Image (cartoon, rainbow, N blue to C red):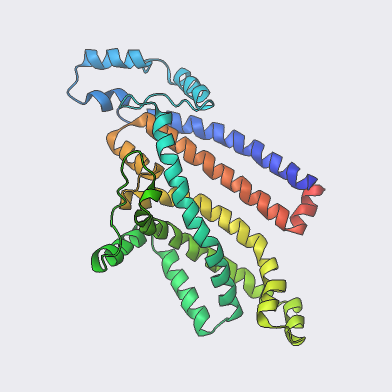
Amino acid sequence: MTGALARTSRRLGLSAVLLVLLSFVVYVGVDLLPGDAVTAHLGPSASAERVAQARANLGLDRPVLIRYLDWAGGALHGDFGLSATGRPVGDMLSDRVGNSVLLAGLALLLLVPLSLVLGVVAAWRRARATDRVVSTTALLLVSVPEFVIASGLVVVFAVLLPLLPAVSLVPAGSSPLSRPEVLVLPVLGLMLPGLAYAVRVIRGTALSTVDSSQAEFLRLSGVPGRVVLRRAVVPAVLPVAVQVWVVTAVGMLGGAVLVERVFGYPGLGELLVSSVQLGDLPVVQALVLVLGALTLGGLVLADLASTLLTPRLRARGAR
């Protein structure tokens, strides 16, 4: 356990350094883009004097390094400044974070048991019809981008079979849970690509375990197949599976940008795309930093889970 904590502490320190570098690159990179919060708010017809006055009022005429230090100091306390609309960026993010967490949480809740069952069963029934169906479907889903899968779900379940709404319209100030039907297609659109990837990795790991001497001994001893899976296969697959689930959850953050946009779901991804289109750069800077921090945090969790569940890594960390 001590070795795992030391390894995690090192990863946390490295992640903190990477997050600082990311914040600098994001702030300076976005600052170099054409336009700023003033031009986005006043529009192209505003006079040069009015634009200059507004930039001075917001402190945008100061050197970029000074502005970055102020911004980074505020970000540490959750203050990301004002958007082009005059609203605090932190308030805009807090309105959307819960919706995105809900979407990713539901997708992960479905993905974990499904990927474990499908991956292990496909490996157990290798080269049979079940394995061919599962492996082929997973390969097809992995090969298709998220927005294509999401669009296909809309065509099938909202157009051809009008069972579910094509757009996730949620009344302002209410939770998507007040209209559960608007969650179904976004959750499926976010979950299916990750499910396909997880099934392929778990199946590959389970194949070597199914042929192991322990599993063979149990089978020759007359132990039922489901008991062999529970005693020998699943425990050996779990360390890899947990790491895949955490990494997949992190990948969902990037996938959510496209999926939320396709369904008009009021989450962080939809806010990021609309902010880019409107040139609301303070919101873009904050969103990229938040998504980067969540990604780094997820990778640390994946590393910690892998270390705790793998005896070889625990022993290496203890040395």
Q: Would residue 273 be found to the left or right of residue 228 on screen?
A: left
Could one spot residue 30 in this view of the protein? Answer: no
Q: Is residue 45 above or below residue 164?
A: above
Quarter of the image holding residue 56? top left
Residue nearest the observer in this picture, 273 or 117 = 117
Q: What residue is drawn where x is 48% and y is 41%? A: 291
Q: Is residue 283 visible?
A: yes
User: In this figure, what is the number of numbered marks?
Assistant: 0
Question: Where does residue 75 sit, x and y in percent of width and height?
Answer: 50, 27
The reply, left or right, for residue 25 in relation to residue 59 is right
Among all residues in the image, which is located at the extreme right? 319
Place of residue 14 in the rendered image (x, y in percent of width and height, measured from the top left): 64, 38
- Vertical side of 32 occupied by 191: above or below: below
282 or 183, nearer to the observer? 183
Query: Residue at 40% of width from left, 29% of height from top?
Result: 89
Q: Position of residue 218 (x, y in %)?
A: 75, 81
In the displayed structure, does residue 289 sit left or right of residue 305? left
